[in-house]
Image (tube, grey):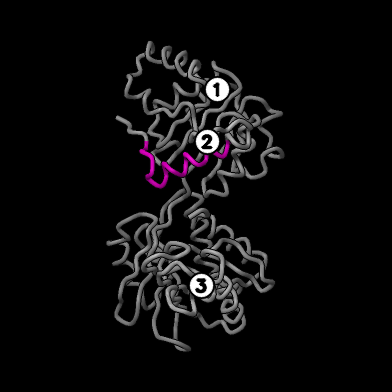
């Protein structure tokens, strides 16, 4: 999904902190083709402000109508949409599949909700994974939806579902990012791993870096920008960045960064020497992706120097240079677009991740 569940929790947290009640819509199940995958989420407040999407079009319009009712009554709804019958065709819902959407109300004065959101915030701040669990029981007007988190093997709230939720942590969703729907004694459990968003480290806050930041953020990445020029590494120039760091030098610039196998490194500094310095450090990390901007000539020069420094051909072959998908990009905005497209392709498994020995 373009917006991560982590970003979604952070948005809901901000809304609740402002005293706003929100209706949250979650795609819980899908069979066949549908606008969005299970786990897609949308939030709407009493003023009709939206965040996130469950697919747009007629499906989203109908869910918004139902969400208004949920905001008024507080009763959750489980809504099924058939996208291959005559009514669906007449409404332009031509995907041909079946989708189930849960809509539930979260209120700022609800202590259960506040504790859950606070625990989600704390887990994300410490980059700790957790499992989001929604326990569903009953039908129609009797439908109940109990939200909980399992952090570090323990449910946040002590409820009638505690034993079931603890067991769920022992057998969490088998695929990270792909929610599961399981039968329980009196209904169903929706389970979803929530991981801190993948981090993109952008080395260089020039024209391309500036264009990269909002695209990376909207694609669901935690976006960190680093430069040794204080006038460039300025949060006012980069308002969408999660973090902007001013470096004394690019030498040793990764020594204190928490780069791991969920990190993406984008090298777009102002010169060949800086690019080489950053790339040499990047090759010593476990980053999932390393890409460097540059022409074929620059690539040859930098790679020859790094080979002389002891890096193998296999290590250098895994650097994406020239960076980004080939779309004929020329302007900084176009180049940023092709870079983010490549990041998403690696994240989604369309392109291979970097392999570290």
- Would you place residue 311 above or below residue 246 in this image? above
Q: Which residue is mark 3?
A: 112
**Percent position (x, y) of residue 113?**
53, 70
Whether pointer 2 and pointer 1 mark residues with C-beta atoms closer than 8 Å, the reply is no
Range of the magenta residues? Answer: 336-353
Mark closer to the observer (3, 2): 2
Identify which residue is drawn at 60% across, 30% down: 330
Q: Quadrant of residue 95?
A: bottom left
Is 190 contained in the magenta span? no
Alpha carbon separation for disc pair 3 and 2: 49 Å
Q: Quadrant of residue 290?
A: top left
Identify which residue is drawn at 34% across, 60% down: 153
Which of the two discs, 1 and 3, labels the residue nearer the N terminus?
3
Q: Could you say whether the residue bearing mark 3 is in a helix, strand or loop?
A: helix
Q: Residues within 10 Å of mark 3 (few under 14, many from 20)?
A: some
**Percent position (x, y) of residue 125?**
51, 50
Is 337 contained in the magenta span? yes
Q: Foreground residue, 13 or 280?
A: 280
Alpha carbon separation for disc pair 1 and 3: 46 Å
Q: Foreground residue, 268 or 148?
A: 268
Q: Residues within 10 Å of mark 1 (few under 14, many from 20)?
A: many
Q: Could you say whether the residue bearing mark 1 is in a helix, strand or loop?
A: loop
**Percent position (x, y) of residue 143?**
44, 84
Mark closer to the observer (2, 1): 2
Q: Which residue is mark 2?
A: 327
Quadrant that contains the C terminus: top left
Alpha carbon separation for disc pair 2 and 1: 30 Å
**Percent position (x, y) of residue 201?**
52, 35
Q: Which residue is mark 1?
A: 250
Whether residue 78 can be seen here: no
Q: Residues within 10 Å of mark 2 (few under 14, many from 20)?
A: few
């Amino acid at each position: 999904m373009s917006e991560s569940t982590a970003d979604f929790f952070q948005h809901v947290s901000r809304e609740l902190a402002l005293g706003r009640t929100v209706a949250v819509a979650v795609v819980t199940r899908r069979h066949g083709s549908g606008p969005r995958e299970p786990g897609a989420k949308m939030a709407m407040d009493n003023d009709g402000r939206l965040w996130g999407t469950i697919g747009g079009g007629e499906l989203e319009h109908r869910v918004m109508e139902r969400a208004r009712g949920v905001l008024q009554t507080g009763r959750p709804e489980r809504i099924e949409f058939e996208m291959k019958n005559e009514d669906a065709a007449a409404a332009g819902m031509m995907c041909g599949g079946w989708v189930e959407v849960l809509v539930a109300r979260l209120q700022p004065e609800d202590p259960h909700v506040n504790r859950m959101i606070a625990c989600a915030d704390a887990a994300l701040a410490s980059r700790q994974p957790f499992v989001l669990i929604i326990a569903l029981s009953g039908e129609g007007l009797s439908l109940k939806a109990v939200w909980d988190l399992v952090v570090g093997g323990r449910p946040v709230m002590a409820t009638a579902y505690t034993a079931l939720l603890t067991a769920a942590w022992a057998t969490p969703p088998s695929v990270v990012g792909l929610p599961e729907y399981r039968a329980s004694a009196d209904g169903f459990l929706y389970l979803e791993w929530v991981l801190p968003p993948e981090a993109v480290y952008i080395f260089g806050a020039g024209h391309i870096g500036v264009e990269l930041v909002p695209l990376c953020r909207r694609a669901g990445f935690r976006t960190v920008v680093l430069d040794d020029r204080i006038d460039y590494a300025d949060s006012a120039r980069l308002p969408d960045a999660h973090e902007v760091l001013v470096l004394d030098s690019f030498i040793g610039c990764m020594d204190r960064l928490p780069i791991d196998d969920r990190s993406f490194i984008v090298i777009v500094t102002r010169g060949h020497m800086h690019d080489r310095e950053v790339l040499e450090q990047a090759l010593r990390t476990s980053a999932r992706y390393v890409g460097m901007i540059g022409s074929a000539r620059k690539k040859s020069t930098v790679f020859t120097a790094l080979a002389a420094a002891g890096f193998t051909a296999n290590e250098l072959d895994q650097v994406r240079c020239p960076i980004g998908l080939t779309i004929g990009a020329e302007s900084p905005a176009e180049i940023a677009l092709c870079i983010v497209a490549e990041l998403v392709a690696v994240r989604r498994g369309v392109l291979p991740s970097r392999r570290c020995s």
